[in-house]
Image: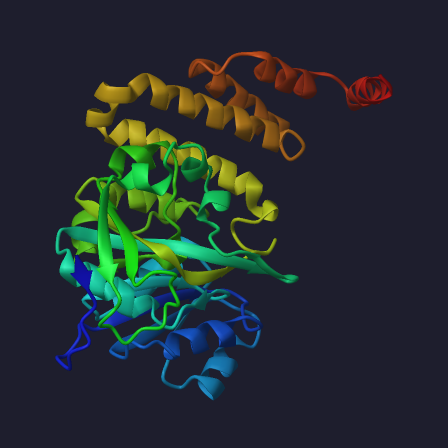
Amino acid sequence: MIRLSHDRTPRPLVSVVIASYNAARTLPAALESVLAQSYTNLEVILVDDGSTDDTPALVARQFPQVSCIRKTNGGLPTARNCGCLAAKGEFVALMDADDICHPDRISVQVAFMLARPDILLCSSEFSAFNADGPVGEAYARDYYSQIAETPGGIKTLFGEQAILDLREAEVLLHSADDLLPLYVGSCYESLAHGNFIHPPTILFRREVLKHCGWFDESIRNMCDWDWLVRVARFGKFGYVDYPLLNYRLSESQLSGTGNSLQASLDILSIRENIVRNTPELRSRCGDVLQIAIGMSALAAADIWIDADKVTSLQLLAKALRNSAFGVTWCKILAKLLLPRYVLSHFRTVRRRN
């Protein structure tokens, strides 16, 4: 049983690192949610990744207590690394510039990490919203196919269950029960097959960076998944089964459809890195990982057809080398080789039938 302490002893410093690019419209609500945390021993580090909007003036005017670091635009991994390098806290919490933190997010996560010193990192369930309003109260299963497709979901992916006792804590989670479920486990092998840890909900021990390295700046869109797999090799993760973050869904974010070209290459690159750098996994499930590389190459080939046929053909060849041959492979090859008017004719005939 884990109890949240509300004694008056000093709490560890937590550095909240927020990467931001042209987010002046959503940033005020995000920063206000961090500054309103029940956990007060915080430093808030905003990394402005070369914004061209009103971000610098807005932060200086409305949030002078926030440390704003300006840098030339380099993408999410460079911003994450810049913020983590500046962090002074024992713990580092990640967040995006368009999300909203639950007021007790940091209190709950720090209590979890202090009670379980064997845990390197913890994340949580999250709710979601878009321009039209709320989308889901517990959205992780909808967002991550790895959770939905695993029997037992998060409980199976982590393995060990713990309990967070809220009855003596000054928090307002509004849980249906005073006993909040937590999960703990070695997630290395599960993460190698696909991510299910939501990056904006992460809080980790800063010392992890010394042992596991920084975010790979060559992986522009999916750097979080790559980093999580590397961290998971060194120890256990924790999970709070309660939405501690409200996640904004929009097409402009990195997970939106507009970034699918680069994301498809990032996914393939990460899968190749996992196979290349983890001999212990290769010996246990090498065939499965190789097929995953092939299927990722196949998906990327399909996405790249209209943007760059040469790249698409190269990806199709890689899929073939990694055992991803079948009907889908043949269909993609046909799309690449046949003239557009022939494909258009086939589509028209198929719709009529």
Residue 290 in percent (x, y) is at: 37, 20
Q: Which image quarter: residue 146? A: top left
Q: How many marks?
A: 0
Please state if 149 lies on the left or on the right of 112 as rendered.
Answer: right
Q: Split into 4 quadrants, where in the image is the C terminus? A: top right
Residue 47 in percent (x, y) is at: 40, 68
Q: Nearer the viewer, residue 21 or 143?
A: 143
Residue 189 in percent (x, y) is at: 27, 32
Residue in the image at 21% along x and 65% along y: 111
Q: Which image quarter: residue 352? A: top right
Q: Split into 4 quadrants, where in the image is the N terminus? A: bottom left
Residue 298 visible here: yes
Residue in the image at 41% along x and 25% along y: 293
Residue in the image at 63% along x and 16% along y: 333
Q: Residue furthest front?
A: 177
Residue 75 visible here: no
Please state if 135 lies on the left or on the right of 83 as rendered.
Answer: right
Please state if 23 lies on the left or on the right of 223 as rendered.
Answer: right
Residue in the image at 50% along x and 41% along y: 263
Residue 312 in percent (x, y) is at: 58, 26
Q: Nearer the viewer, residue 4 or 106?
A: 4
Q: Nearer the viewer, residue 317 or 58?
A: 58
Please state if 10 lies on the left or on the right of 100 as rendered.
Answer: left
Residue 146 position (above or below residue 245) = above
